[in-house]
DNA sequence: ATCCCGAGGG
DNA sequence: CCCTCTGGAT
């Protein structure tokens, strides 16, 4: 969950670089709750948005300790009460940490790629999620967004998508829009 | 709608 | 120089 908060507007490589030293120093909810804010900011600085992310993680730690016994709750409703956690992050935690696939992760990649593929016309992530839930069989709800995220990072990139190397360009109404 | 953040790529 | 990078809160 912490790594997912840090991942906002940041490459995964940089998140991994930071968490390697961050997690040994902050191994549990209490350590974030008791953290010195400035120190925490410096520890996560390379991930960007470090002041707001540090504030979120600190408040998140406090609430996890005060309300949830230092454990991460396993429901959407509870997760949404945590600082720095909205629907996207909550779906990631539910799906990857708890194996609960009641929703579909809709991040910037899923949003962009589903638009280009013509799977949705909506700009609202919640509406996109609901539309995908009607299109996809439940067994696909977990894997689908991760496949799209990988595809979005490597091929269907935001700026200059590599349509010539895309294995599903035959399915894509946006093919050639970026030449 | 805007702000938060800055390294790295084209 | 402009844009992107696994968002969320105000």
Image (tube, coloured by chain):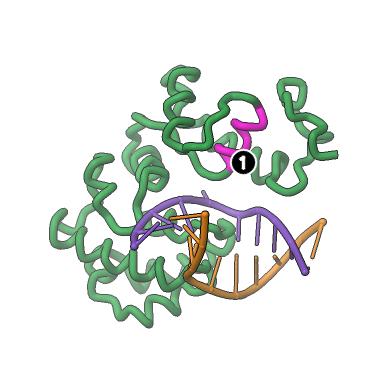
Chain colours: A green, B orange, C purple
Q: Is residue A48 above or below residue A170?
A: below
Which residue is depicted at the point 30% across and 58% down? A83
Which residue is depicted at the point 16% across and 54% down? A68
In the image, A159 versus A64, the foreground residue is A159
Image quarter hosting the C terminus of chain A: top right
Tell which subunit mark 1 falls on: A
Which residue is depicted at the point 42% across and 35% down? A126
The image shows residue A128 at horizontal and vertical percentages of: 48, 31
Place residue C2 in its image quadrant.
bottom right
Report which residue position mark 1 lands on: A150
Place residue A103 in its image quadrant.
top left
In the image, A29 versus A109, the foreground residue is A109
Residue A68 colored magenta? no
Describe residue A59's horizontal placement relative to residue A116 as left or right: left
Q: Residues within 10 Å of mark 1 (few under 14, many from 20)?
A: some
Describe residue A131's horizontal placement relative to residue A35 as left or right: right
The image shows residue B6 at horizontal and vertical percentages of: 60, 75
In the image, A75 versus A179, the foreground residue is A179
Q: Is residue A100 above or below residue A107?
A: above
Place residue A139 in its image quadrant.
top left
Describe residue A14's horizontal placement relative to residue A155 as left or right: left
What secondary structure is the magenta-colored segment mainly? helix
Which residue is depicted at the point 24% across and 41% down? A77
The image shows residue C5 at horizontal and vertical percentages of: 61, 54
All told, the count of numbered labels is: 1
The image shows residue A85 at horizontal and vertical percentages of: 34, 52
Describe residue A61's horizontal placement relative to residue A43 as left or right: left
Q: Is residue A159 above or below residue A34?
A: above
Magenta-highlighted residues: A109-117
Does dot 1 land on a helix, a strand or a loop?
Answer: helix
């Amino acid at each position: 969950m912490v790594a997912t908060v840090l991942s906002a507007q940041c490459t995964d490589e940089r998140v991994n670089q930071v968490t390697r030293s961050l997690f040994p120093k902050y191994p549990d909810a209490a350590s974030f709750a008791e953290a010195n804010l400035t120190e925490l900011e410096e520890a996560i600085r390379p991930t960007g948005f470090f002041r707001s992310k540090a504030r979120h993680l600190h408040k998140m730690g406090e609430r996890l300790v005060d309300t949830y016994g230092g454990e991460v709750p396993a429901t959407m409703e509870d997760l949404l009460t945590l600082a720095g956690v909205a629907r996207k992050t909550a779906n990631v935690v539910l799906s990857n940490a708890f194996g609960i696939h009641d929703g579909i992760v809709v991040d910037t990649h899923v949003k962009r790629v589903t638009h280009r593929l013509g799977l949705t016309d909506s700009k609202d992530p919640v509406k996109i999620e609901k539309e995908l839930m009607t299109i996809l069989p439940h067994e696909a709800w977990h894997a689908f967004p991760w496949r799209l995220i990988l595809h979005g990072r490597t091929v269907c990139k935001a700026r200059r998508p590599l349509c010539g190397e895309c294995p599903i360009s035959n399915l894509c109404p946006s093919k050639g829009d970026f030449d």
